[in-house]
Amino acid sequence: MKQTPRSVPVVTLKADEAAQALGVSRRWFDHNVAPEVPHIRRGIHKLFTVKALEKWAEANMERA
């Protein structure tokens, strides 16, 4: 019997992944987003929750 792969929900992203998810460069992310978004730091790892990134994006939306 062949098993289908289970997808694991993504909860956190590394900075490179977070920048890519927002469609910006890592440098722009480091200067304009990272300082405003709460993150988790464990050792050398800095993780951003998907929820925090979504909240930041919603808060920074402009109306036409």
Image: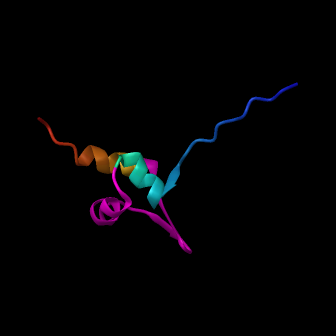
At a point 21% along the width and 43% down the height, the residue shown is 61
Vertical comparison of 55 with 38: above or below: above
Give the x, y percent position of residue 11.
53, 49
Instruction: Work out which quarter of the rendered image holds the C terminus and state it.
Output: top left
At a point 75% along the width and 29% down the height, the residue shown is 4
**Residue 41 magenta:** yes
Give the x, y percent position of residue 27.
34, 63
Instruction: Work out which quarter of the rendered image holds the N terminus and state it.
Output: top right
Give the x, y percent position of residue 44.
54, 73
Farthest residue in the top direction?
1
Question: In the figure, is residue 12 to the left or right of 7?
Answer: left
At a point 58% along the width and 41% down the height, the residue shown is 9
At a point 56% along the width and 75% down the height, the residue shown is 43
Q: Is residue 48 visible?
A: no
Give the x, y percent position of residue 60.
23, 48
Question: In the figure, is residue 64 to the left or right of 30?
Answer: left
- Nearer-the-camera pick, 37 or 19: 19
Vertical comparison of 52 with 7: above or below: below
Image quadrant in which you'd find residue 15: bottom left
Q: Which residues are magenta?
A: 24-50
Farthest residue in the left direction?
64
Image quadrant in which you'd find residue 29: bottom left
